[in-house]
Image (cartoon, rainbow, N blue to C red):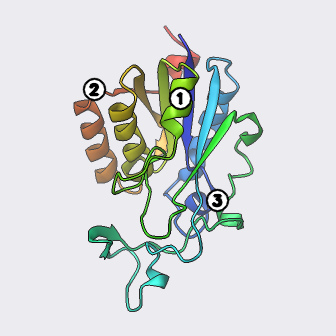
């Protein structure tokens, strides 16, 4: 059994920056306890890494307001505030996160023409990031996923993991994740469960009965 933890987008802009998830900072100590638990063989992280001209930013679409639905390459697209721009403070991992322990970092959202919530592939599902190959090459049999935000990047990463990693057990660590909205979290968990994802909390790893 080879186990890995995938930490999704625990970056400054999603904690106290331009696209902050409510109470997002509360999960950092939980994630750190998982990182240092020695339970995992590998610690993986995804990192939103947008160019400044990314077309999912409202600022790059004249007359568009943030948090409204627009269109990008013929597909519906939420118009976001500028966030996680490459080589800026907002794109950095939060300073309290034990990022020095990461074995691998998968950057995403690099193509300005398409958004990429998932750590595994873009929203149009035309191109993969290569993370699935990395996981398969390292013979990972259990992948635990947590981070920000449950109803967007975490959910999409998990659903892609289910579809791309047929030989890997996928689990969601709920108390090491935060959502933008309560309703979004509930919907995400419903979708995950329907896909066969195991929903759990960190104490089931750190203090198993």
Q: Earlier in the sequence, mark 2 or mark 3?
A: 3
- Mark 2 = which residue? 196
Q: Is residue 125 left or right of residue 89?
A: left
- Mark 1 = which residue? 135
C-alpha gap between disc 3 and disc 1: 26 Å
Q: Is residue 160 left or right of residue 83?
A: left
Q: Secondary structure at mark 2?
A: loop
Q: Earlier in the sequence, mark 3 or mark 1?
A: 3
Of circles 3 and 1, the one toward us is 1
C-alpha gap between disc 2 and disc 3: 31 Å
In the current view of this chain or complex, which residue is farthest to the right? 100
**Image position of 47 with respect to 52: above or below:** above
Residue 120 in the image: x percent, y percent?
46, 44
Residue 93 in the image: x percent, y percent?
68, 52
At x 62%, y 20%, the residue is 40
- Mark 3 = which residue? 12
Q: Secondary structure at mark 1?
A: helix
Question: Observer-nearest residue: 59 or 20?
Answer: 59
**Image position of 185 with respect to 141: above or below:** below
C-alpha gap between disc 1 and disc 2: 19 Å
CB within 8 Å, label 2 to label 3: no
């Amino acid at each position: 059994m080879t186990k890995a933890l995938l930490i999704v987008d625990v970056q400054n802009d999603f904690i106290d920056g331009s696209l902050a998830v409510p109470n997002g900072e509360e999960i950092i100590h939980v994630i750190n306890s998982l990182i240092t638990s020695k339970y995992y063989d590998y610690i993986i992280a995804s990192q939103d890494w947008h160019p400044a001209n990314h077309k999912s930013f409202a600022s790059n679409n004249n007359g568009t307001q943030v948090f409204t639905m627009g269109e990008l390459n013929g597909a519906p697209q939420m118009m976001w505030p500028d966030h996680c721009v490459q080589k800026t403070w907002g794109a950095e991992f939060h300073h309290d996160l034990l990022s020095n322990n990461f074995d691998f970092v998968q950057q995403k959202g690099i193509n300005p023409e398409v958004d990429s919530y998932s750590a595994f592939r873009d929203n149009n599902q035309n191109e993969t990031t290569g993370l699935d190959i990395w996981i398969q090459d390292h013979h990972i049999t259990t992948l635990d996923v947590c981070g920000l935000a449950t109803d967007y990047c975490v959910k999409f990463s998990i659903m892609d993991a289910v579809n791309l990693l047929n030989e890997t057990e996928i689990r969601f660590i709920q108390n090491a994740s935060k959502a933008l909205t309560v309703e979004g979290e509930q919907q995400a968990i419903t979708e995950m469960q329907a896909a066969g994802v195991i929903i759990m909390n960190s104490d089931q790893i750190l203090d198993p009965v």
